[in-house]
Structure formats: C-alpha cells, structure tokens
Image (cartoon, helix red, strand yellow):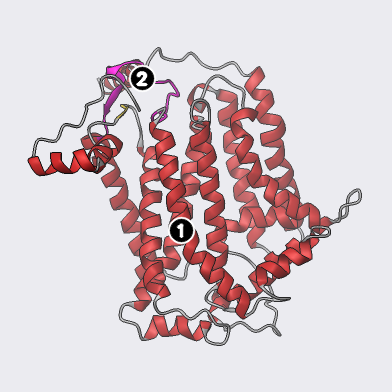
Amino acid sequence: MSFPWANQYQPKHPVMKWVDDRLPLPRFVYNAVGAGYPVPRNLNYFWNFGVLAGAALAIQIVTGIVLAMHYAANAGVAFNSVEHIMRDVNAGWFIRYAHMNGASMFFIVVYLHIFRGLYYGSYKAPREMVWLLGVVIFLLMMATAFMGYVLPWGQMSFWGAQVITGFFSAIPGVGEPMRQWLLGGFAPDNAALNRFFSLHYLLPFVILGVVILHIWALHIPGSSNPTGIEVKDEQDTVPFHPYYTAKDGVGLGVFLMIFAVLTFFTPNLLGHADNYIQANPLSTPAHIVPEWYFWPFYAILRAFTFNFLWIDAKLWGVIAMFAAIALLFFLPWLDGSPVKSSTYRPLNKIFFWILLFDIGLLGVCGMMPAEQPWVIFSQIGAIYYFAHFLIILPIISRIERPLPMPGSITEAVLAKHADKSSATA
C-alpha cells in the first residue's frame, strides 16, 4: 500500500539498522503490520477474521506437527495410534482435541471472512487477485480437511473416503484410473492412508505460502472497508498499529475463549460418534456423512437423482459440486455493479441474506439422510445457489439503483458519529 503519507521505517538502534541494511525483515514487518501500514479508519470487527484465520492456521500447523510425531499411517495400527495419543502421550488428548476443533474454528472464521467479502464487495476491482487467492486457500483447506478426516481410521473416516473418492469414478474414461491412483488401490487401505497422511502434512505449508501471497496482494491496493469507497487522502486512514492490532487483539481473545470452551468442555460436539469405532470394510454405517463444513457441497452433490441428456446423475452431482466452488473464481466479473458495499445496494442486501439462508438449508440437507423431504430441499437449494450467482447477481447489478454514497471514508465516519450524537442528545 504505497501512500505518500505512509510512515517510512528508519531504525534508530545500531543493531536494528545493521540487520535492516542486510536483511530488511524489520522494515517488512513494520510496513506489513506496523505504523507504516495505513488502513481505512472505519473497519469494523468483520475485518478481524483474516487475522483469526491466520491464528487458526498456526494452531493447526503446531498441533499437527506434534501429532505427526506419534501417529502411525498404517491401516492396522492407525486407529490404535490415535487412541495411544489420547491415553498415553503427555497432554496428547489436548493436542488432538485442539487439532480437531481447530479445523472447525478455522472453517468458521474463513466462512465468516468469505461472507463478509460477499456482503461488502471485497472481491471487486482492484482486489480481484486478493479474492482469487482466497478461493485457492479455501480449496486447499477443503482438500487438507478431507484427508485429515480419513487419518483416525474410524468408521466415518473409512466410509467417507470410500464414498467421496467413489464419485471420481463417475468421470468417463479417466474417473476410475484417477480414483485408483488417488487411493493407491481399489479401496481405502494402507496406500491411501500413507498418501493422505503425506498430503495432509504437506498442504498446510502450501496454504501458508498462499496466505503470504494473499497478504502481499492485499497490501498493493490496501484493505477494503464497509463503505466500499477507496482511500482518498491521509484523513481516511489510521496506522495499523496500534489501532487495529488492539482491535484484532480483542477479536483474538474472544476467538481463543470460544476455542477453549469447545476444546475443554465439548470436544466432540462437531465430530461424529461413529469415528470412535475402528474402520470395518464389512460394516457400512447407517448414514455416511462428512464433516459439517462440507455439508452444503455434499447436499449439492446428492441433489442429482436422475440422468439428464447423456450424463448420469452421479456425474452431474460431481460437476455441480466442483462448479459450486469454481463459481467463486468468476464472482468479480459476474457482479457488474460499480458500488461495492451492500450497505448502499438495497436489492443486493436482500438477496445476500436469501443466499445465506439457502446455504444454511443446504447445510442441513447435507447432514440429513438422502431421503425425502431433504432430497427435494437440496435440489431447490442447489438451483437457487447457482441461480444467485449466474442469473440474479448479474441482473440486479444492472437494474439496481444504489443509495447515495458519502464522498469519502472520513465523511461517512463523521456522519455516523453525528447520528449517534443526535440520538443520545
């Protein structure tokens, strides 16, 4: 973010000056998160979720490294090695529960981060690359989480791997060879467990690399803000430190309290009881369900129950599931409105909340068995999901009449404080 009024780092201590001249790491940190990085003065707590996602990633990497020291990626002993971690390793239960619930907390803050971006138009120019890299991070998270879900080698782990990888076989010609290559055989076993463990360990570091690119891309145009108006002068900004480091500190404290309650008091709330039963290829669970953060996409996958044209229902489900995520890559160009924030877009605001309800409905359908009325609800939800991005959003971006916008961020902030003063007078 190269504003002419941004403070430039000038180390005063001889040691810091010597380090900065040879390795400008102090300068990099100062310009990235210090007083040298000006940010819009009107950011609210919805802008905390990027930092919280970084904290969740750090928790996952640290706890994952410790767990890898005790885990055995072998179908014969994987389940028992997890039990060994829980019962015999010093604080192993805490590390494992922190890793389990850390994944859920990671997805919670990332989903909130995405929804904030959708509401405030953070995907629009000049921040398209920030958004695209964020979607890449989301995809990598989903792949990492799926492979991690297999590692405990419980009933839901085994059958989740069997069912989800089985959908690849629907792809004509290359589907079955792709599935066998992914599993290392015809069914989940030692080879699949070793592959998934290796990739599950590697991908968080890939995510970390993309996160660095994501932050780098963000610092070029600077942070978005609730009004969607670009920074015009020095009055529109404040230094990131101490203003937003303090604000992020409050958010981090709340995040850690919720995380602690989840880990210490209800560690299995977001898990599945069947995963505490050792994997048995001869005993299929009554209801196979993935982790909660996959439920909306799982509902879309199961929404297709009949063949259409020359493509069977199974392949349509696979196409729709991947297309539901791929749509996010095209969002900056599907929404043609010059106004970013839904605060000034009354129609877009209404349909945003309808979309959130729809995703919630898909989540419930993904959790439920594939029977009526959940099948028809998932079909309705899937139709609306695609219609929102491909039909509704492009149309309302052309016909909508936005509300009058303030001339600058400072004007919006002063007007807000004036309204509060008049309300309390």
Q: In the structure shown, which secondary structural element does the residue marked by tag 2 occupy?
A: helix
Return the residue nearer the eye: 333 or 303.
Answer: 333
Residue on which the image places disc 1: 204
Q: Position of residue 202 (x, y in %)?
A: 48, 62
Q: Is residue 65 magenta?
A: no
Give the magenta range: 222-240
Badge 2 amino acid: Ile
Q: Position of residue 85 (x, y in %)?
A: 40, 81
Q: Is residue 234 magenta?
A: yes
Question: Does the image show residue 377?
Answer: no
Q: In the structure shown, which secondary structural element does the residue marked by tag 1 occupy?
A: helix
Q: Position of residue 305 (x, y in %)?
A: 82, 57
Residue on which the image places disc 2: 409
Of the residues under marks 2 and 1, which one precedes in the sequence? 1
Question: Does the image show residue 322?
Answer: yes
Return the residue nearer the eye: 20 or 372.
Answer: 20
When asked about the image quadrant of residue 245, the answer is: top left
Badge 2 crowding class, 10 Å Cα cut-off, few under 14, some 14 to 19, many 20 or more, is many
Q: In which quadrant of the rendered image does the N terminus lie?
A: top left
348 displayed left or right of 31? right
Residue at left 87%, top 52%?
311
Q: Are marks 2 and 1 in contact (CB under 8 Å)?
A: no
Badge 1 crowding class, 10 Å Cα cut-off, few under 14, some 14 to 19, many 20 or more, is many
